[in-house]
Image (cartoon, helix red, strand yellow):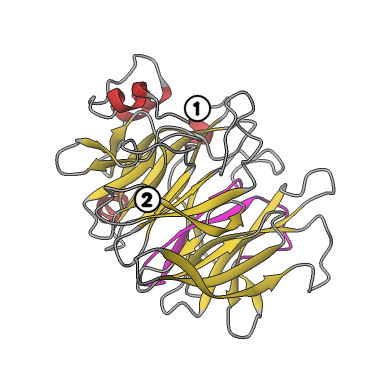
Amino acid sequence: MKTMLAFAVLAFLQPSFSQGSVFDRIAKDAPPYLTPLLEWGQRPEWSLDGKYIYFLPRDFSDVFRYELETGKIYPVTTHFYHHTFNRVLCMGNGDLLLLGPETFDPANPWEFRHKLRLFVLKAPYDKPAIMLNTFIDEGPAVSKVDSTIAWTLPGQREIKMARIEYDEDGKPFLDRERMILSFDHLGLPMSHRLETQNFMPGNEELVFTYYRGTEEEPFYFAYPYMLNVKTGKIRPLIDDTIDGYNEAEGVSNDGTFMLVESDRHTKPMSWSIDVYLLKLDGSRHMERLLDWNTRFPGGTISDNPVVSPDDRKIVIQLGFLAAQAGQGRGMFLFDLDKYEEYKKSK
């Protein structure tokens, strides 16, 4: 699909807060630890040096990056023709891993939502992205120290792991590909699903979300789990006997905490979530960081949080409940140090 000129123009505009919008109300009333970045955009991802936030304006669009120091926005994928992208992740060598459909029909945009392809956009991002030989459902886990990735297969019942290598012409390919978790092999009910999230430091353990629900709706309940990629053993990171939605999100680079989209502040089975911080010290302690779902009823949520390389900041998406999960309408910067100071002053 031809890159949309409208997004190329938007990429060079500074945000303009709309009077009365939820974003504007949050921005004007924001505590000292919360800074508005953009009132549009979704699926944020930190650059390895912490200077930029990569993001997309919406599902099935182009990739841009936001410079934190200046507030400037730069296009990343508008210089070549493609069939749109859905997510962007930073690889340890500086390349970008993109998710997008192999073909695209704007009249039926969700047809390939759960059957995307992986692409590598090689630094300095001046050439077209190169498609890898695999399909993916939802986001992959990408190592920050080497070229290891893990991804969920279509159907959300299996996770594979591989390394991205490069041939003599510099073309990326998947090497040492292997299955590391299969709900089919474990004999788990067909109503159970999973989704890859993040590697822990060292790449020996992988955080993923374990979904349980009904045959009609497998995603009612969600729990963050840990997989040992060597032994295949899995274990819950919170109490998984209590009904609730607790989807694993960004993991700190030092492995001491992770972020969770949770509905424990409200009734289950509604996906009315906000961002929580879960300590990975075995205490299973979860702390709610934002209360947008309570303050702004009618579908407003905070979601898709990602942790900065120094583990001191978080970018959080202003989300909304929609037919297709993960859609956003703005991004905020959450400063953990300022947050702790603020709590002490109260």
Residue 346 seen? no
Of labels 2 and 1, earlier in sequence is 2
Residue at x 70%, y 44% (from the top left corner) = 268
Q: Position of residue 264 (x, y in %)?
A: 61, 48
Disc 2/disc 1 C-alpha distance (Å): 25 Å
- Label 2 crowd bin: few (<14), some (14–19), many (20+), radius 10 Å: many
Residue 233 seen? yes
Q: Position of residue 85 (x, y in %)?
A: 47, 41
Residue that extends furthest to the left in the rendered view of this protein:
70
Q: Quadrant of residue 32?
A: top left
Amino acid type, callout 2: Glu
- Can you tell which mark lies on residue 45? 2
Question: Which residues, given as a range, are shown in magenta?
Answer: 238-264
Residue at x 52%, y 72% (from the top left corner) = 162
Q: Is residue 107 above or below residue 52?
A: above
Residue that extends furthest to the front in the rendered view of this protein:
169
- Can you tell which mark lies on residue 280? none
Frontmost residue, 249 versus 286? 249
Q: Give the residue pinned by disc 1.
A: 296
| Left or right, 187 with reference to 6 | right
Q: In what element is the residue under mark 1?
A: loop
Residue that extends furthest to the bottom in the rendered view of this protein:
231
- Label 1 crowd bin: few (<14), some (14–19), many (20+), radius 10 Å: few
Query: Is 253 covered by the magenta stretch?
Result: yes
Amino acid type, callout 1: Phe
Frontmost residue, 331 versus 43? 43
Q: Is residue 292 above or below residue 345?
A: above
Q: In what element is the residue under mark 2?
A: strand
